[in-house]
Image: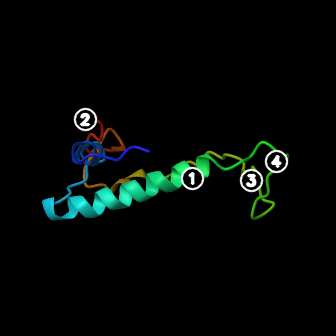
Amino acid sequence: MTNVSKEELLHIANLASLNIKEDEVEKYLANLQDILNFANIVSQAPVDELTQTVGVNDNYNVFRKDEIKRFEEMDLLLSNAPEKDRNMFQIPKVIQ
């Protein structure tokens, strides 16, 4: 088992766009280490003898048919847009 360093935590926080204050670092380190320790315990569970899994319910692959619906009042729809371009919602770039 390896411990997470402060630098690794801050790197992960940066990747996730989290602003962690200096006084919160120790708390986050402890929480992240607890999560990783638990994941390590779970990954070592003996599963070789298991032949089937059990879910909490019987629902699986519940799909609905895709249907194209034409919205006739485009101006009314776009009236909610803070910005629009060529009959589309214009949104800020989300990829760096």
**Marks 2 and 3, the one that precedes in the sequence:** 3
Image quadrant where one finds the C terminus? top left
Residue name at image x 53 percent, y 48 percent: 40
Q: Residues within 10 Å of mark 2 (few under 14, many from 20)?
A: few
Q: Which residue is mark 3?
A: 62
Residue name at image x 60 percent, y 46 percent: 43
**Marks 4 and 2, the one that precedes in the sequence:** 4
The kind of residue tagged 2 is Gln
Image position of 34 with respect to 47: above or below: below
The kind of residue tagged 1 is Ile
**Marks 4 and 3, the one that precedes in the sequence:** 4
Q: Residues within 10 Å of mark 1 (few under 14, many from 20)?
A: few
**Distance from the alpha carbon under mark 4 to that under mark 2:** 44 Å
Mark 3 secondary-structure assignment: loop
Taking the view exactly as shown, the residue that stands out farthest to the right is 51
**Image quadrant where residue 91 sits:** top left
Q: Which residue is mark 1?
A: 41
Tell me if label 4 and label 3 are in contact, CB under 8 Å: no
For this rendering, which residue is in front, 25 or 88?
25
**Marks 1 and 3, the one that precedes in the sequence:** 1
Image quadrant where one finds the N terminus? top left
Mark 1 secondary-structure assignment: helix
The kind of residue tagged 4 is Leu
Q: Does residue 59 appear to the left or right of 2 in the view shown?
A: right
**Distance from the alpha carbon under mark 1 to that under mark 3:** 33 Å
Number of numbered markers: 4
Q: Does residue 4 appear to the left or right of 41 in the view shown?
A: left
**Distance from the alpha carbon under mark 1 to that under mark 2:** 36 Å
Residue 87, position in %: x, y? 36, 42
Q: Which mark is residue 1?
A: none
Q: Which residue is mark 2?
A: 96
